[in-house]
Amino acid sequence: MPEKKFNDIIMQEASEPIAQWRIGDVIVTKVTETEMLRSITASLPNADIDTVQSTLWLTEQFSLEENHIRFSFHSLIIETASRNILVDTCFGNDKKRPSMDYCSHLNLPFLERLEQAGFTRSSIDTVVCTHFHADHIGWNTTRTETGWEPTFPRARYMFAGKEIDYWADKFHAVPHGTPTDGMTAAFFDSVQPTISAGLVDRVSTDHRICDEVRLLPTPGHTPGHVSVVIESKGEYGLITGDAIHHPCQLVQPRWSSGFDLDSAHAMHARTDILETAIDTHALLIGTHWAGPTAGRVEHDGNAYRLAR
Ligand SMILES: [Zn+2]
């Protein structure tokens, strides 16, 4: 994909689109759709730029560029003894996103890349979306001649009931059923068709999916936001979702994402995840973290850092 610029956003191809980790007997594979550079002030409005730029582990591992920070948009596929679980489905192709030019009408080879990593559409039996923002639900559906169809026809789509209710209420309040914002439009073309196809299991925010994988409620970014806990043979992994948008937030968990709907709850969720990751020595896998994407967390004075 050629680089594309939109105001304070630059969309770029990922340098390492596929990566893999092992947690006990479980394998986690990252398949990247795209990366984005965005200014620190737009991404984390209350972040201190000097602190970010002088934090060595951040600059070394996450290669900050001037006043921009890098985000990755990837799916994480969790392979257990019984399931192939696809966590978050990026922006998707061909979607119209009012007021979000950078992710409108994309044409990216995500499904081809998923196959390269060893996963056909029919090999995915479970889809989990940490929340319903447009960058986490896009590949739930693909455009066909008859409309939006589920991309993974053999999968159960496991969605938190709280998240479904929040976005369904917003969608139903839209006059004439034509959303004028990208996030509500996303519910219409990327969630509603999976519900209509009868593929959705409405679950609690602490739902256990199988022996090795369960959801962890981390509300704040959105009301029904979940993170994902992996446990196998005494080893732990933790997928952040957008509770931790960027590793900068380890330096100061108070720094909220501009997309957090409830920043106080989001900060509590962030701190809980970081403490849980330390307690269980979990591999913390970032949903939007570029570069190494994953690492072990340790205390750093009153804050946190990733171990080298
Ligand atoms: Zn996101």
Image (cartoon, rainbow, N blue to C red):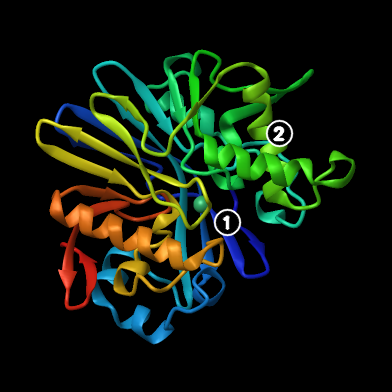
* Position in image of residue 189 (x %, y %): 71, 34
Percent from the top left, x then y, of residue 145?
A: 78, 19
**How many labels, in total?**
2
Query: Residue drawn at (77%, 40%), measured in percent from left and top?
Result: 172
Tell me if residue 57 comes above or below residue 201 in the rendering.
below
Q: What residue type is labelled 1?
A: Met
Specify the quadrant of the image occupied by residue 297.
bottom left
Disc 1 or disc 2, which is closer to the eye?
2
Secondary structure category for the residue under label 1? strand
**Which residue is disc 2 drawn over?**
189
The tag on residue 264 is: none
Q: Residue at x 45, y 49 (%)?
A: 14
Give the residue at the far right of this rendering: 176
What number is the disc on residue 11?
Answer: 1
Quadrant where the C terminus is found in the figure: bottom left
Of residues 74 and 252, the one drawn nearer to the viewer in this rendering: 252
* Badge 1 density bin: few <14, some 14–19, many ≥20, Cα 10 Å: many
